[in-house]
Amino acid sequence: MTIALSLPNPEKLIWWTKHLGKLLPEHDVKPADRITRPEEVRYAVVWQPPAGLLAGYPNLTATISIGAGIDHIAADPDYPKAIPVVKTIGPDMTQRMCEYVALHVLRLHRQLPDLQDAQQRGDWHQIVTPTAPNRKVGVLGLGHLGRSAALSLQALGFDVAGWSRRGDAPDGIKGYDTSQLHTFLARNDILVCLLPLTPDTRGILRADTFAKMPRGASVINAARGAHLVEDDLLAALKTGQISRATLDVFHTEPLPRSHPFWAHPDVLVTPHIASLIDPISGGEVIAANIRTLDAGKTPDALTHVSRGY
């Protein structure tokens, strides 16, 4: 039984192929461009696969996303909607996202950029900040990663709220549903985006969103670049409506060297590292999911593109 692997980075493709092959010796794990008999492919393990690739496997039974999102698969209009997609969600990926969100919420909360600016001026500037219970943080998206990040922030003492389609939230965290977006935005000093990318959430970080937040609020986007309207953020930073932004994801990756985010004094750029999935930890999760499928069972993270993404 053949497993096709597709990643845009050639070095990572080699790494994943070797490691997944060791984890699944009962399968023939190959890069997609080395497969000569597409009818033998039963599973495809992919990140940002080329359009039409997956439709070319007539006996494909499941696609495994190397990540928690499936928008990179659903974006292909030729993807066979009857074929289920399995998300890759595991403890290491969750831990990394929680660490990233906590780090950057704390950075903004304790005004480290201002302290760094003061250091450059040789200015002994003792900034007094409120304590965490007096800082309101909102998490857009309460899926697995969003809920975990929200609980991590709550454990640090922050006043945390979450927004999702139905408004379901963990105990102790106030949840807001779709109809309450404006109320949710108005409460937050720091907004963290961990939404899945869907037609409804694309461009959700835009001018009218920023306008409904308190003046001087900050934004962290660790979800997808397409959630953000980049020109709207630049405009909001210029007026001071948004004071700081931490961005881990972008419309074009790598971020072009000419992009204004690189040199903007109020933007921190990180190169899509919030919750990197490597073949060591991620491979274990994927191998376990494939063995579950082999046994005729349903992995917990299985979904369908036809249900929306």
Image: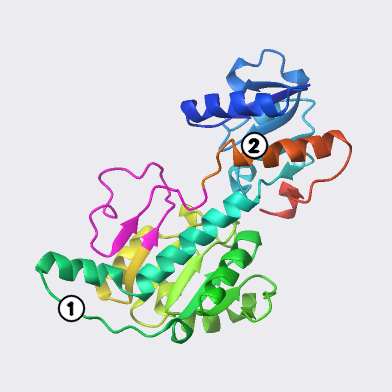
Q: Is residue 228 visible?
A: yes
- Residue pointed to by mark 1: 125
Disc 1 on helix, strand or loop? loop
Q: x%, y% of residue 236?
A: 32, 71
Mark 1, other Cα within 10 Å: few <14 / some 14–19 / many ≥20: few
- Name the residue nearer the viewer: 240 or 110: 110
**Is residue 276 part of the magenta span, yes or no?**
no
Amino acid type shown at disc 2: Gly
Marks 1 and 2, how far apart at CA: 47 Å
Magenta stretch bounds: 246-275
Classify the position of the N terminus by image quarter. top right
Of pointers 1 and 2, the one earlier in the residue sequence: 1
- Residue pointed to by mark 2: 283
Q: Quadrant of residue 22?
A: top right
Q: x%, y% of residue 304?
A: 75, 48
Residue at 10% x, 69% y is 122
Q: x%, y% of residue 278?
A: 55, 39
- Name the residue nearer the viewer: 206 or 162: 162
